[in-house]
Image: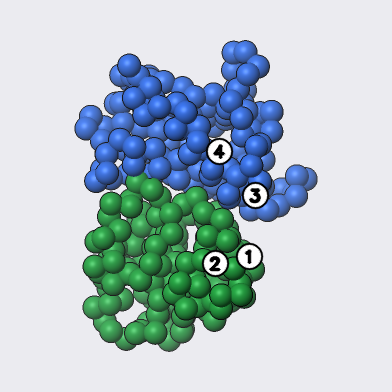
Amino acid sequence: MSLLGAVGAQQVAQIAQEFFAAMIDREPGLLTSWSHGPVTVTDPMHAWVGLGTVPASRLQLTTSADTAGALTRALLSKGEAEPVADDDVVDALGEIANVLGGNVKALLAEHAGITLPEVSRQLPPGRGGVGAGEALFAWRGRPLVISLYTL
Amino acid sequence: MRALVIDDSTTMRAIVSEMLGGLGFDTAQAGDGREALDLLESGQRFDLACVDWNMPVMDGLEFVAAVRARRQWPYLTLMMVTTEGERGQIVRALAAGAHEYVIKPFTPDALASKLVLLGLLPVRELR
């Protein structure tokens, strides 16, 4: 069973949807399960946090740079045409991974730590480790992938 | 009322500051516990500090412990802002001197409820 399977894909979806409804969209229903066939993320950005479980694991969020910008505008209550700085996008995507990771970690180990988030255009080292599992979402129709795996 | 929002994420600082602003607070921000202590030591007075747990330089727990150890700001209410995964550590934060906590993600209404509990907002602020 994958780590995602152990946590429960439905629980991960619930955590993500609650977060998006409360702090990103300020309304429910805009983050849904992906139902458009295979996911292709163009110009991807990855954000991840390490979870201090035994063995160590990682939650990773992957979406396109465009979507990362849109998420940043939504988090900061900016209009769709307003520019956002690259640093803001990195910070926002990292914070999304941090909140998701912190809540998912609670399902795995109560007293484990969590690393500070990292964000990159490159996949993190160790990606595809044991028990890789992906939960696929559509946020306002845009693909968004949450991966959970041990290192 | 003045609030100090302490979080290494500029995004989260902006969100929490916006929520607090909507509840009538004037806000200032700090990127970690050390920056926050510097603001307090500079003489700025705050009624509330919203403290992230997981920060570089000085984390939330260290900040709470440092504030309480100095006893210079007895009027300062300390509220931890954490993720669910840190809930188990809340006991440590409360023991160190934090007054309350709120779990990310949260809505403005959830934050307002905590502030009412703390006596920092009148009950009428609850929707």
The three-letter amino acid code for the residue at tag 3 is Arg
Q: Judge by depth and name the residue closer to the eye, B80 or A52.
A: B80
Badge 3 element: loop
The three-letter amino acid code for the residue at tag 2 is Ala
- Tell me which chain the residue with mark 2 is part of: B
- Tell me which chain the residue with mark 3 is part of: A
Say which residue label 2 marks.
Answer: B112
Give neighbour class at mark 3: few <14, some 14-19, many 20+ (Cα, 10 Å). Answer: some
Mark 2 or mark 1: which comes first in sequence?
2
Q: Is residue B6 left or right of residue B20?
A: left
Contact between marks 2 and 1 (CB within 8 A): the answer is yes
Badge 4 element: helix
Mark 3 or mark 4: which comes first in sequence?
4
Say which residue label 1 marks.
Answer: B127
Mark 2 → mark 1, Cα distance in angstroms: 9 Å
Residue A41 lies in quadrant: top right
Please state the horizontal and vertical placement of residue B5, each as a whole percent of the image: 48, 67
The three-letter amino acid code for the residue at tag 4 is Gln
**Residue located at (26% from left, 81% from top):** B70
The blue-coloured chain is labelled A
Say which residue label 4 marks.
Answer: A17
Please state the horizontal and vertical placement of residue A55, each as a whole percent of the image: 23, 29
Say which residue label 3 marks.
Answer: A26
